[in-house]
Image: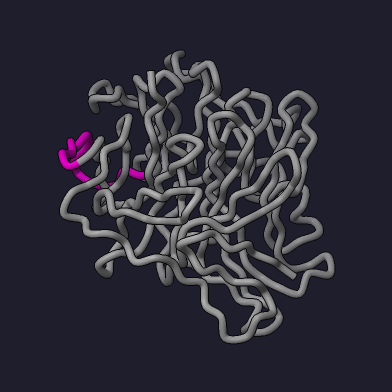
Amino acid sequence: MSVVSRVSGSVLVAAGVAGVALVGPTPASAATAPSMASLVAYVRSGDVYVSKGATETRLTTGGGWSRPRWSPDGRSIALLKGGQLWTMKADGSAKRRLTTRAAAGPSWSADGKSIAFASLSCSGGPGVYTISATTVGASPAVVFPAYCRDEELPAEPAARAAESGSLSERLRADDAVAWSPDGTKVAFRGGDCESIYDACLTVGTLATGGEKTVDAYGGGSRQNSGFAVVPSWRRDGAKLAWTAYQKGETAADDLPVHVVEYDVATGAKRTVGASQDRELAYADTGRAVATGTYKNGSWVMVVNLATGARTPFHQGSQPSVQPVR
């Protein structure tokens, strides 16, 4: 049974309380976007934009771009084009495809020399790969599952078509990964836990190949279904957030799409933001950006992590915050 905490300004579900819905505070007026200390990259209509406040800059054209992720030095962005991994400079120039292998949700290493991404592994399910961000023509190497490290790479799968349907259906198979700020771990959907659960989220340790399940749904005596996807680390590595959804044993146990924050030291979890918030990225210890629903569309929302207050930033989704240099 899931128990979700309450944060001032957001009313959150405690499983087993009949008739309670996951709701949140009404966003403030979007007339003036809040000011951010550094650029936020986000996607609208298949192209990438960046902004610190009211003014935004478009970095790509032609559509088909997704999941922008800033490098640790803030000078480059990893992103997907048609389901393949690319990089570009912070101003949108020097676009370069790194691999033809189908890829999902990239994440940079702490030193900015490599990028992790998800793709088909020797297990037949999603695996985590790394590839050099600087070497032209570099080959990817699998890191999870660890037993695939000594196997031949599977044939390159075709890029997967974008998911359609409801928000939960589109998010369910998102394989975005997150490399920890200290470079020692990667959070990713799936892993060895899929031999027990129907869906799960894993934190894998690169040095040992060991895996730790941090969220799971269905199977293993769990009377629920759902998913945990799109992980994101706080820059001090003390918190890990992800997008979750749950269908409980009864309607009272249902949790619509929401953001879970996990304390790495204690294992404690809480929900932040509002119903339908997803894809959270930390700005600092006090604020984050997340995709939310506003004006009947997807907007990047600035979220106060202490109070739950949410302010519209710009229309779009999949935000990533440039590290302050």
Image quarter (top left, top right, bottom left or bottom right) of the N terminus: bottom right
Which residue: 39% across, 35% down?
321
Question: Which part of the image, by quadrant, shows the C terminus?
Answer: top left
Question: Residue furthest toward the top?
Answer: 135
Nearest the viewer among 155 and 47 is 47
Above or below: residue 20 compared with residue 87:
below
Q: Nearer the viewer, residue 255 or 34?
A: 34
Is 18 positioned to the left or the right of 163 in the image? Answer: right
| Residue at the image position 57 percent from the left and 86 percent from the top | 19
Count of numbered tags:
0
In the rendered image, the vertical position of residue 294 relative to residue 262, given as above or below: below
Side of 78 where 129 appears, left or right: right
The image position of residue 85, as x and y in percent, is 42, 34
Q: Is residue 170 visible?
A: no
Q: Position of residue 172 (x, y in %)?
A: 54, 61
- Image-based side of 180 in relation to 152, left or right: left
Taking the spot 40% from the left edge, 46% from the top edge, the residue there is: 289
**Residue 7's quadrant in the figure?**
bottom right
Q: Which residues are magenta?
A: 54-66
- Residue located at (62% from left, 75% from top): 247
Main structural element of the magenta stretch: helix, strand or loop? loop
Q: Position of residue 197 (x, y in %)?
A: 76, 61
User: Is residue 210 at all visible to an observer of this figure?
Assistant: yes
Q: Is residue 208 above or below residue 81?
A: above
Q: Tell me, yes or no, whether the highlighted magenta stretch contains residue 312.
A: no
Q: Say if the magenta span includes residue 64.
A: yes
Task: Give the residue at the far right of this rendering.
Answer: 221
Provide residue 127's location: percent of width, then percent of height. Answer: 64, 41
